[in-house]
Image (tube, helix red, strand yellow):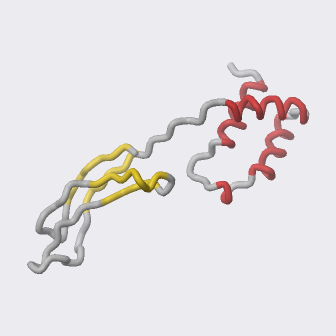
Amino acid sequence: MFSIEELYEKILFKNIHTIGCDDGDRNMDVLLPYIQEAFKMSDDKHGEIMEIARNKEAPEIRLNVEIVEAKDLEPKDSNGLSDPFVTMYIASNPNHRYNTSVKAGTLNPVWEEHFSL
């Protein structure tokens, strides 16, 4: 069982490290006063617990991706076919790229390849 302060810290931590949102998509300055009011936290206690939440190590996030297939690709080779492959990267780390295998001579490749980014 968590104390009110521990639960409050966990909620602040989750909001600091919201996954899938850019900072422009959420406004912590608007949300935090509602959380503080709901938990009846004084400004001093809020500041103390917020500092604890900010100093905790950020969560490690993994994105699992499966490349299944493509259909009806445009031909790029002189024989009317292509040798397709998929390249992926995360915008925050564009230098680290992930590639599927090359499927030679097809416009309907099937990969069924899994990646953990």
Closer to us: 5 or 46: 46
Counting labels gives 0
Furthest residue to the front? 95
Question: Residue 37: x and y, percent?
Answer: 86, 40
Question: Residue 55: x and y, percent?
Answer: 69, 31
Q: Is residue 51 above or below residue 102?
A: above
Question: Residue 78: x and y, percent?
Answer: 11, 80
Question: Residue 25: x and y, percent?
Answer: 66, 58
Furthest residue to the left? 79
Q: Residue at x 24, y 74 (%)?
A: 73
Residue 104 occupies quadrant: bottom left
113 left or right of 96 in image: left
44 left or right of 1 in image: right
Q: Is residue 115 above or below residue 39?
A: below
Residue 90 occupies quadrant: bottom left
Q: Residue at x 63, y 42 (%)?
A: 17
Closer to us: 21 or 83: 83
> The C terminus lies in which quarter of the figure?
top left
Q: Residue at x 17, y 71 (%)?
A: 82
> The N terminus lies in which quarter of the figure?
top right
